[in-house]
Image (cartoon, rainbow, N blue to C red):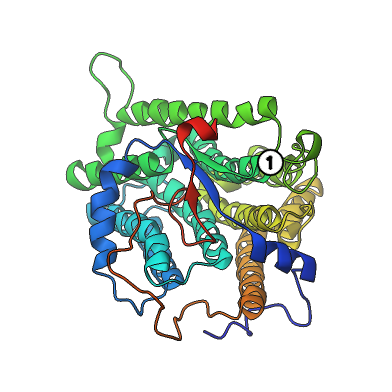
Amino acid sequence: MKMHLLAYKDCAILSSQQLRKLSEHKYSVYSASLLDPLLQPWWNWLVRQTPLWLAPNLITIVGLILNIVTTLILICYSPNGVDPPPRWTCFLCALGLFVYQSLDSIDGKQARRTNTSSPLGELFDHGCDSISTVFVALSACISCQLGHYPNWLFFQCFCAIALFYCAHWQTYVSGTMRFGRIDVTEAQFSIIGIHLISAVLGPEIWLTKIPIAGVSWNYTILVFITFGYTLNVINFLKMFTQGGSGKNGSSVAGTSVLSPSIPLTLVVLPALMIAQKSPQNIFTEHASVYIMAFGMVAAKITNKLVIAHMTKAEMEYLDWSLLGPALLFLNQYFNCIVPEIWLLWFTLAWGTQDLLRYCAQVCLEICQHLRIDLFRIPYTPKGASNASVGSQSHFGADKNGGTTHRKSKSKAH
């Protein structure tokens, strides 16, 4: 597929040293997921039905597009998370997320099955997941009517975005991606369950009161999700006590283990300040646009963090994707001389195009370096076999990047 129109012109993003390090990258992962072993038979059956000519990255991008489209349909009917969307839109989101989760779990199996594993596959998969996280979190909040509680809506969506970034922060420090017992797969199926309840009983069910407790049902969702977030935060904080895999406890690039905190802070802190100080209630009135706009910025810095880990390079702190949030912040400082909604739409448009152009350029450079195609298998795979679908888990433990190896629990700890 041609990506030249999207890519940056006359500007290489990856240096020759980074490309060399990328070629040497080996994917390391530890997963203790509760659901992954139970879903392995389904994933193995599904990949056996997949044609050998279908490229792994194409599987990933098809799932992502379907997930985004179904979420955008839901957003069209309830852009602020207050108006109850039609039940069928919730069912579509459940279906879209299930398809995405399934396809996202077999791309690595398909890569090994067709002998087309490469570091680009891992990078492409994480990049798609960084975008999907934004839409999955937003769709769940709309489906259970969290727009009635704007502060909770903000907290849930930005926690999901930040924790995804922190998962790769931990990988940047330790060199191994780790997943706990309650992690990505469990969260995805919980959200599928939320969508199905809304589809069967109607989104309004979440606003009804629990007889004894006297609080609405969506508060129970908040409790469970917050509990899951807390577990992930605890696992993440253990990283600082264990130290990094680099020299003197540094990151894989030899940098401070705290260095990735700067880009994340430059996204989350302005988002919080702009939402709280907006005289036009920009977050409350345009919650979906707000989350998508800052979500695209977060996806960009997450992709840069993934690349920094895979190339063992220092991460850059400032980025052009921060232009939109900076303009929103300055506009508030000068008493909103420009309508905030105009700048919010600009932030979304600018962040989206910047993310797409950046990812296209990175993929183009890696494809040229490794002499491979992104969405096409241009030859008959050597040693292709329907049987070699592997037995490793999905994202985090079964992706099509590099040489994947799963560490046992004793070795991982």
**Could you tell me which residue is drawn at 39 percent across and 84 percent down?**
380
Work out whether 219 lies above or below 255. above
Q: Identify the amino acid type marked 1.
A: Val
**Could you tell me which residue is drawn at 71 percent across and 31 percent down?**
243
- Quarter of the image with the C terminus in it: top right
Assign a secondary structure to mark 1. Answer: helix
Q: Nearer the viewer, residue 270 or 302?
A: 302
Rendered location of residue 194, percent (x, y): 30, 41
Rendered location of residue 394, percent (x, y): 40, 51
**Could you tell me which residue is drawn at 67 percent across and 58 percent down?**
307
Q: Residues within 10 Å of mark 1 (few under 14, many from 20)?
A: many
Q: Can residue 1 be seen in this snapshot?
A: yes
Rendered location of residue 134, percent (x, y): 50, 51
Q: Nearer the viewer, residue 322 or 336?
A: 322
Work out whether 49 lies above or below 174. below
| Residue that extends furthest to the left in the rendered view of this protein | 200
Query: Based on the displayed image, in which of its 4 quarters is residue 167 positioned?
Result: top right
Rendered location of residue 171, percent (x, y): 62, 44
Q: How many marks?
A: 1
| Residue that extends furthest to the top in the rendered view of this protein | 212
Query: Based on the displayed image, in which of its 4 quarters is residue 22 positioned?
Result: bottom right
Horizontal arrangement in the rendering, residue 395 relative to residue 23 (left or right): left
Q: Can residue 67 be seen in this snapshot?
A: no
Work out whether 11 lies above or below 386. below
Residue under label 1, please give it: 173
Q: Nearer the viewer, residue 327 or 96?
A: 96
Horizontal arrangement in the rendering, residue 31 relative to residue 351 (left or right): left
Q: Nearer the viewer, residue 412 or 212?
A: 412
